[in-house]
Amino acid sequence: MFDNIKATDGFKNSISVAVNSGKLSHALILEGSDDESRFLAATEIASAVMCQSDAKPCGVCSHCIKCGKGIHPDLHIIEKTDDSTMIKVDAIRALKTKALLFPNEAKKSVFIIRQANLMNPQAQNALLKIFEEPAPHLCFILTCPSKSAFLDTIISRATVYSLGEEIIGQSTGDDKADSLAAELISTLAGENEFSFIRKTAVFQKDKKLFASTVSAMIPIARDALILKSGGKDLLVEDSTASKKLAASFTQKKTAALLDALQEFSDSLQFSPNHNLAVTRFCSLLYSIKTN
Ligand SMILES: [Zn+2]
């Protein structure tokens, strides 16, 4: 199992044991490694869930073959569409409708939410309702760089498996980036644009810090959006910056900021000119603020 997937042996073993002892949770979060590996791992787990052989996944039965080709009628893949940077509540509502139906060929229906970290808070809340009362014929696999993108209530109802080293994360585990991210969000919420630009000067020589900081700004913006919509389940421990942002930005602007940060963070690794990217970052955020 998982022969061609970039993941630790610990991950491969624990999944294999859980699957073959029938103890796999109905909701899994796969974090770490890269998007492609997480998705391949999720597909293999789906095969294993549906496979009828003794050693799952056998790779040769019709369930395994159809899952591998992505054509199994009971395998449902939810991912962001090309014209959106987020997985919105509509996609989760559609999932809910499918989840009401019994599987066609297998004993379980498997739903893979790829890059589930892109679900906005409304989508996460909609998903939570399904997690709370899971029907026995359902299995959910959420893939993401880091589970920190999810509401605590989602995490507590799922089993989290890490494939290993995180490549592009939202929780950077980098104190410097985290504190810079909070500082930048607070400054953006304030009045002084020049002060914001001055604070980004440190990025000109540090590409990695820039990427980590942009990444760390995402959960802060997401928390501000949660605050704006009356929610309380915040992702970041220190909510000072989110509160400042929520007080200064409208809900629409906060959502636009979150979208922009996510998109910017995704595109950053393909950005050929680093200094230009920093400049573009400042003007992008201020265009959202002043529009
Ligand atoms: Zn099989």
Image: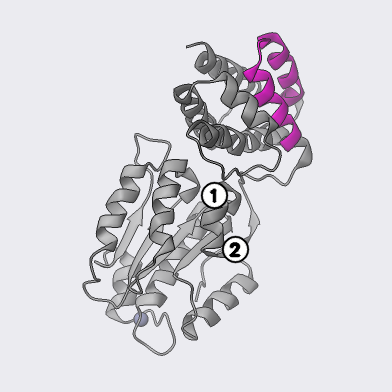
Q: In what element is the residue under mark 1?
A: loop
Q: In what element is the residue under mark 2?
A: strand
Ligand 1 contact, mark 2 (Cβ < 8 Å): no
Q: 212 or 273: which is nearer to us?
A: 212
Instruction: Please say whether residue 273 is visible from this viewpoint.
Output: no
The percent position of residue 53, horizontal first and vertical second, equals: 37, 87
At horizontal 72% and vertical 37% (from top left) the residue drawn is 178
The percent position of residue 166, horizontal first and vertical second, equals: 64, 53
The percent position of residue 241, horizontal first and vertical second, equals: 67, 29
Residue located beneath label 1 in the image: 151
Label 1 is placed on what type of residue?
Leu
Label 2 is placed on what type of residue?
Leu
Q: 101 or 274: which is nearer to us?
A: 101
73 vs 170, left or right, is left
Mark toward the viewer: 2 or 1: 1
| Residue 210, image quadrant | top right
Q: Main secondary structure of the magenta part?
A: helix
211 vs 199, left or right, is left
Q: How many marks?
A: 2
In the picture, the disc for residue 163 is: 2
How far separated are the C-alphas under marks 2 and 1?
A: 20 Å
Give the answer, above or below, for where 89 lies relative to 5: above
200 inside magenta stretch: yes
94 vs 127, left or right, is left
Range shown magenta: 178-204
The percent position of residue 99, horizontal first and vertical second, equals: 29, 62
Q: 274 or 157: which is nearer to us?
A: 157
